[in-house]
Amino acid sequence: MDRRLATVDHDAELYKERNTVERLINKLKAWRGMRPATTRPRKAASPGFTCVPR
């Protein structure tokens, strides 16, 4: 049973794109949360290369 008195116009394509982006962001957040807090960033790929902050 539809309880809405009036229909709401919307752009279906825009909604579809926005929904896709929202789902991607949520998946990235979930994936990021699975990493243990004790995980450290990887060392430099090359042993001779050092990144020093300025």
Image (tube, helix red, strand yellow):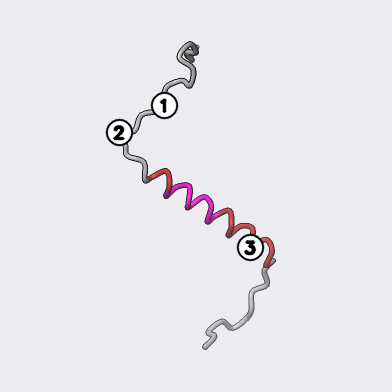
**Amino acid on which disc 1 is placed:** Arg
**Amino acid on which disc 3 is placed:** Lys
Dot 3: element: helix
Q: Which residue is mark 1?
A: 42
Mark closest to the chain's N terminus, 2 or 3? 3
Q: Main secondary structure of the magenta part?
A: helix
Q: Which residue is mark 2?
A: 38
Alpha carbon separation for disc pair 2 and 3: 37 Å
Magenta range is 22-30
User: Which-is-in-front pick, marks 3 and 1?
Assistant: 1
Task: From the top left corner, tell me how far across and down residue 3 is, in percent.
Answer: 53, 84
Residue lying at the far left of the rendered structure: 38
The label on residue 52 is none
Q: Locate residue 7 relative to residue 29 in the image: left or right.
A: right
Q: Are marks 2 and 3 in contact (CB under 8 Å)?
A: no
Alpha carbon separation for disc pair 3 and 1: 37 Å
The label on residue 16 is 3
Question: Could you tell me which residue is drawn at 64 percent across and 58 percent down?
Answer: 17
